[in-house]
Image (cartoon, coloured by chain):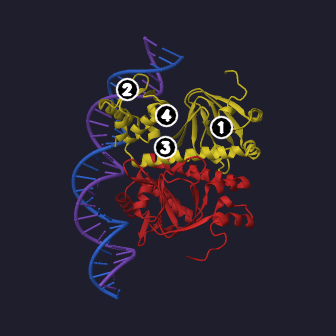
Chain colours: A red, B yellow, C purple, D blue
Amino acid sequence: MAAQATHECVQLVPIFQELAADQLDTIESIVQHHHYQPGETLFNADDPLDTLMIISGGQAKVYQLAANGREQLLYLLQTGDIDGEAALFETKHRTSYGEALVPTDVCSIRREDFQKLMQKYPSISINVLNVFGKRLTQLERQTTSTATESVEARLANYLTETAASLNEPAFKLPLKKKDLATFLGTTPETISRKLTRFEQAGLITQKPGKIIQINDADQLLLVE
Amino acid sequence: MAAQATHECVQLVPIFQELAADQLDTIESIVQHHHYQPGETLFNADDPLDTLMIISGGQAKVYQLAANGREQLLYLLQTGDIDGEAALFETKHRTSYGEALVPTDVCSIRREDFQKLMQKYPSISINVLNVFGKRLTQLERQTTSTATESVEARLANYLTETAASLNEPAFKLPLKKKDLATFLGTTPETISRKLTRFEQAGLITQKPGKIIQINDADQLLLVE
DNA sequence: CGCGACTTTGAATAGCCTCAAGACATGTGG
DNA sequence: CCACATGTCTTGAGGCTATTCAAAGTCGCG
């Protein structure tokens, strides 16, 4: 839609840090651009996994389906995030689903091309290792949290973390309650109830448009 | 304890695949050896993360503590597994605890040494990427499973998977029920009760010494 | 054999989910 | 610009699973 800047996606991505402009040109020339509408599918489980995806704009969710059909949100991809790295080297097919939440621009690099790039610019593989490491650490935390803490504690944590990462006490929930529920491993009804309780306790204030204002971050972190 | 073969740990590890014997010698010369008794600590959360650990023998558990103090088992390290990679490149401290379950041998490589190795032998970083990828995929599955499936389904899954990976319908649980419980995100009591139910339903048979025999793997997978 | 750790069993409770209905918002077509 | 349709959110009632606490039983090891 908008005119394409030369390095539109490539320069956004941490894994291509430290590369010179002309090297970015090379990379940009081999990527493919796609655009997705909200609700559109970026990929499905069992799809062949042969491309690395870069979110150059918008927002998408990555989720899995459990045996009983319930959805588990694993990641929320934002501008500059990448997906597909996890199995670029080994696994032959995807294990999760990707879906655009808002109008989203994606550029993708084919597996072989990416592997050539890694050989040519070794700093890329170090950067990819860093991305992996962060993701692992985050996922370990998420696993621990959903398995051992109450829904109330998880929600409280999510709110304070989101506020902290935005550096603002008031923010708009980036997800529908339904998606937030699958992220926290609960249901929309429970989220709704817990938020009401937080508000009654004076910990937060809810405003129209999914705006949440945190009034007492310290107390919120103490919720069990 | 036992006499040390030259490449005792190094040759066990997938990330050093494809290296020649003399290259393995080089690596072996820079690793440090440690031995741990059951219950001994390999590392704690908040420890500085500056070494890559290789399990050259034995078994260890890696777990996190939630805010409420409950334990979540993340990985069970077996001979040949590595730990510490997740943050070798960026994070400055550990986020999990490691503890030997049986007498365990570990060799470790200092961060700087390992980074030099990766520069010298680029195949190592590709191998590390593979290990990361597998771990991510496994952890994604675990997250989905604990968040969306019932304890019964998770336990049934665990049993069939363990049996499948050993290629035997009867096997000894590699963990105490207490640890298995934290792995599956539940309590020892619940595990006990569910196993009894499975047995009553004829799906498994329990024998002394934590031996479980699977009688009907198909039905077990259908448990909701 | 005896101690400590682990496991099993029981009873009561609590937290969360399900189902269902109504309120609200959002976006579409007339 | 309004009316309606669709999807999302809230609120309530009820039920169920899994946890908690407690105590007895079993295993393994010195």
Residue of label 3: B69
Residue of label 1: B53
Q: CA distance from mark 2 to mark 4?
A: 19 Å
Q: CA distance from mark 2 to mark 1?
A: 35 Å
Are the residues tagged 3 and 4 within 8 Å (C-beta)? no
Q: Amino acid at mark 3?
A: Gly
Q: Amino acid at mark 2?
A: Gln
Residue of label 2: B206
Residue mark closest to the camera, 2 vs 3 = 2
The numbered dot on residue B165 is 4
Q: CA distance from mark 2 to mark 3?
A: 31 Å
As helix, strand or loop, the secondary structure at mark 1 comes to strand
Labels 2 and 1 share a subunit:
yes
Labels 2 and 4 share a subunit:
yes
Asked if residue B156 is positioned above or below residue C30 in the image, the reply reads above
Q: CA distance from mark 3 to mark 4?
A: 32 Å
Residue D8 screen position, x and y as percent? 37, 66
Residue C19 screen position, x and y as percent? 25, 56
- For this view, does A175 lie left or right of residue D3? right
Are the residues tagged 2 and 3 within 8 Å (C-beta)? no
Chain identity of mark 3: B
Of mark 2 and mark 1, the one earlier in the sequence is 1
Of mark 3 and mark 4, the one earlier in the sequence is 3
**Is residue B130 or residue A32 the one in the foreground?**
A32
As helix, strand or loop, the secondary structure at mark 3 comes to loop
Labels 1 and 3 share a subunit:
yes
